[in-house]
Image (cartoon, grey):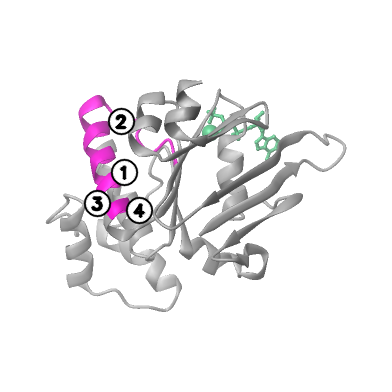
């Protein structure tokens, strides 16, 4: 379970601007929350507060009832994986990129495990490919695999398909949908697409100028 209560972030003085305030939601395991709203509303800021890439200045986030401030950041980011609009892959092979997270925790992920993960995301035989020469859709699948190699409980998705062409977008959407379902991932999915929010999410959080303008069951919020 992932909860957010009165979560917010205000920049320190002199700017002292409030980027986000009073965000509240509860997600059971396996639930998908779509976060929608105009550019600059604070959607990416919310994701960064959830895995503490940025530090909240108010409120709290809990993961399975535990305040995330009590979880060491590296462990938190293993448990709360993130996939961004563009895949930031490291120079090296696809396999090295996938092995990065487990290695950081001192765990060894075998070649067979990497191959199995890659096959699962539709990239069979890609292990030794140069990560920096992949297409956008392939790179995004590797970024997803890299997150999955950490066995996360929560997946934060920041417009993961918006930089892809329509064909790649549909296939990456279908991949994410099946992974979320089979691994019972709790998911916070930032999207500009109302259609994507409607098909992917059970709940929707609409953000405008740093404030929540609507929150609830997807069908209800998107009809309003
Ligand atoms: N570290 C920061 N310092 C100053 N301002 C910031 C910082 N991070 C974000 N902002 C500002 O906070 C606001 C919200 O940014 P955010 O990236 O969360 O928007 P967004 O909803 O994700 O927009 P988009 O849809 O364009 O990605 C913007 O005005 C942005 O310029
Ligand atoms: Mg953003």
Task: Pick whichever, 10 or 106, lies toward us.
Answer: 10
Residue 107 marker = none
Q: Earlier in the sequence, mark 2 or mark 3?
A: 3
Q: Is residue 106 left or right of residue 15?
A: left
Residue designated by label 4: 91
Residue pictured at 21% horizontal, 70% vertical: 113
Mark-to-mark CA distance, 2 and 4: 21 Å
The image shows residue 193 at horizontal and vertical percentages of 40, 25
Q: Which of marks 4 and 3 is nearer the N terminus?
A: 4
From the image, give the main secondary structure of the stretch colored magenta.
helix
Residue 130 marker = 3
Residue designated by label 2: 164
The image shows residue 29 at horizontal and vertical percentages of 43, 58
Packing grade of label 2 (10 A; few <14, some 14-19, many >=20) is: some
Mark-to-mark CA distance, 4 and 1: 15 Å
User: Which corner quadrant of the image does residue 39 belong to?
Assistant: top right
Q: Which of marks 3 and 1 is nearer the N terminus?
A: 3
């Amino acid at each position: 379970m992932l909860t957010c209560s009165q979560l917010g972030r205000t920049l320190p003085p002199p700017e002292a601007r409030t980027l986000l305030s009073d965000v509240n939601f509860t997600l059971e395991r396996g639930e998908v929350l779509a976060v929608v709203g105009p550019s600059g509303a604070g959607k990416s800021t919310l994701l960064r507060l959830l895995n503490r890439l940025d530090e909240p200045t108010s409120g709290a986030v809990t993961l399975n009832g535990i305040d995330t401030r009590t979880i060491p950041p590296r462990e938190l980011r293993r448990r709360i994986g993130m996939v961004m609009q563009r895949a930031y892959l490291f120079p090296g092979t696809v396999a090295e990129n996938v092995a990065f997270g487990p290695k950081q925790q001192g765990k060894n992920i075998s070649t067979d495990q990497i191959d199995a993960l890659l096959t699962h995301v539709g990239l069979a035989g890609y292990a030794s490919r140069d990560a920096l020469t992949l297409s956008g859709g392939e790179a995004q699948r590797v970024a997803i695999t890299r997150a999955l190699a950490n066995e996360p409980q929560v997946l934060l998705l920041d417009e993961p398909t918006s930089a892809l062409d329509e064909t790649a977008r549909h296939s990456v959407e279908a991949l994410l949908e099946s992974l979320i379902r089979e691994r019972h991932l709790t998911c916070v999915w930032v999207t500009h697409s109302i259609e994507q929010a409607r098909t992917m999410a059970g709940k929707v959080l609409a953000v405008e100028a740093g404030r929540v303008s609507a929150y609830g069951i997807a069908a209800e919020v998107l009809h309003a």
